Amino acid sequence: MVAWLATIVRTRALDLLRAQKRRARVLDEATAMSAEGSAPALSSGSPAPDEGVEAAEAQVQVREAMGRLPVAQRHVLELAYFGGLSQSEIAERLSEPLGTVKTRMRAGMEKLRTTLRPFMEQPS
């Protein structure tokens, strides 16, 4: 369950980064459109509107859950899932014992699981 939740958190973070890149691209296209006077072509690879809304809602929930974590726990999780660092690399970077990093990660993941559980359960 912890691994699954970690994957969800990482996926949502990557979604956020991709969304930021898309926004920048749309802004560039809009700027080009106003300069050229024509509308840019719509991409057929865009997600469906309802998928975008669901993803945005999930991102908000994950962001809020991460914000409720103690700073030390949030920091190690961000380094692991957003920075791509291993627990050993995190321990080295923070000059903390490996056991401390592992404990913080586990505690943070448990808190995230508890906080996000209502959003993960499928309605019957």
Image (cartoon, rainbow, N blue to C red):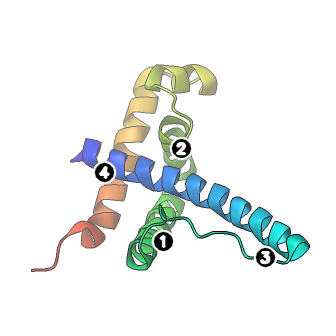
Q: Percent from the top left, x then y, of residue 67?
A: 54, 62
Above or below, 115 relative to 97: below
Q: Are marks 1 and 3 in contact (CB under 8 Å)?
A: no
Q: Which comes sooner in the sequence, label 2 or label 4?
A: 4
Q: Are marks 3 and 2 in contact (CB under 8 Å)?
A: no
* Cα gap from disc 1 to disc 2, whole angstroms: 19 Å
Identify the residue under disc 3.
38
Identify the residue under disc 4.
5
Give the label on residue 78, or none: 2
Above or below, 117 relative to 96: below
Q: What secondary structure is marked by label 3?
A: loop
Residue under the point 49% across and 58% down: 66
Residue under the point 41% across and 73% down: 48
Front: mark 4 or 3:
3
Identify the residue under disc 1.
56
Above or below, 121 relative to 7: below
Tell me the kind of residue under disc 1: Ala
Front: mark 1 or 2:
1
* Cα gap from disc 3 to disc 2, whole angstroms: 41 Å
Q: Which comes sooner in the sequence, label 1 or label 2?
A: 1
Q: Percent from the top left, x then y, of residue 96?
A: 55, 25
Q: Which comes sooner in the sequence, label 3 or label 2?
A: 3
